[in-house]
Amino acid sequence: MRGTHKVSRHAAGREAPRPGARGLSADDKTPAHTLNEEKFKMKTLRRLFPRAAVALVLLAAASAAAARQQQPPPKVRLPQASPQATLTHTVGVTDLTIVYHRPSVRGRMVWGDITPEKAAAVVQATSYLPKNSPEGTLDGGQGTGKDFPLAPNGHVWRAGANEATKFTVTDDVLVNGQPLKAGTYSLHMIPGKDEWTVIFNKKADQWGSYNYDAKEDALRVKTKPEWRAESQEMLGYDVPAGTANSARVVLRWEKIAVPFTVEVPNQDALVRSKIDAAVAAAPGDWRVPLEVANAYANDEKMEDALAWADRSIKVKETFQNLRLKAMLLLNANKKDEAIALAERAVARGKADGEDTTRFEKRLADLKAGKM
């Protein structure tokens, strides 16, 4: 029986698989056809990348252009025929502000009467003027001109130019004796030969008086116009007179002055309420009662000043509040107490790193009888 034996493929003259040939890769782990597919994908990506990059650039440019179209155009500031102005005035602790525009006369007729027929014709010819309102504004209407008053009697007027005049007050007040809540209002007026109406409207932001709605009025008051011999070219607001709790506001234009009074009722109670609010907001801050003490001292209300200096010291002893109390005691002819507290103030100041040089000199003068 003839024997048999196995012959290996290598022995039969067949070559071993070459690295990279279909089958196993050089590391005998990854199939070679998988590597070829990955190389194909890389070549495809390299061909596609420039196109994708161009597309992204075009998309970004289109987005930027769209954004620019959506943004409002840049504003160019130009001179105004009726420049804006602001009047600020403080009554006690209450601030009032009037923001308005200042038209000029420029030879035009400013005040005067017009017939109902003429008013109706102007309203009919002008699309933006209010209809069905006997006192509606006629400002800039069709048919008005040099011989037509800019602010005719009996019709609402913006009390300035451009946007409606804006009136702001930080506390409740009385205007010509009538209550007006703290806030911001549009200010309108109705001229008259012998009597004017001053209007505070709750719609603060509006252009002129074209959208004025009497239903939004917070307050209307009456006042008497004052005629002057001298004409004023540009409209203006002023506070020519006042008291500790009131201000007389005057609109002045051409030969007329229109006054109204803004009064802060219960001034002392209002001041105290603001002080209490400030202290309550920072109960651990010694500077708040010290500021109150200084304010009372400046008003020569020494008992109140001394009481608030003590409140500041109670929160925290400092060079500043001890110094103030020492000066208040000296003012009250309590020299010995003043000297003792002044020495304590110097010691406190040095311990806290304060500059006490000037105060020490004053203390030395006080001890020497030079004060």
Image (cartoon, rainbow, N blue to C red):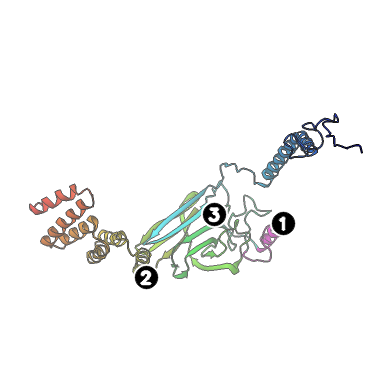
Instruction: Name the residue rendered at 25%, 60% in the picture.
Output: 297
Q: Looking at the image, which residue sits at the far right?
A: 1
Which circle, 1 or 3, is nearer the viewer?
A: 3
Q: Which residue is mark 2?
A: 266
Instruction: First in sequence, mark 2 or 1: give its number.
Output: 1
**Three-letter amino acid code at disc 3?**
Gly
In terms of sequence position, does the residue under pointer 2 or pointer 3 come before the other?
3
* Image depth: mark 2 or mark 3 in front: 2
Give the residues drawn in magenta, as a range. 116-135
Q: Dot 2, crowdedness within 10 Å: few (<14), some or many (≥20)? A: few
Task: Judge left or right: residue 111 versus residue 8.
Answer: left
Q: Position of residue 133 (x, y in %)?
A: 65, 66
Q: Quadrant of the N terminus?
A: top right
- For mark 1, what is the residue? 125
Q: Residue 332: x, y in percent?
A: 16, 63
Mark found first going from the N terminus, 1 or 3? 1
Measuring from the top left, give residue 121's x and y in whole percent: 70, 59
Residue 367 belongs to magenta span = no
Q: Note whether residue 37 is visible.
A: yes
Which residue is pictured at 24% across the width and 66% down the height? 307
* Three-letter code, disc 1: Ala
Q: Quadrant of residue 304?
A: bottom left
The residue labelled by disc 3 is: 160
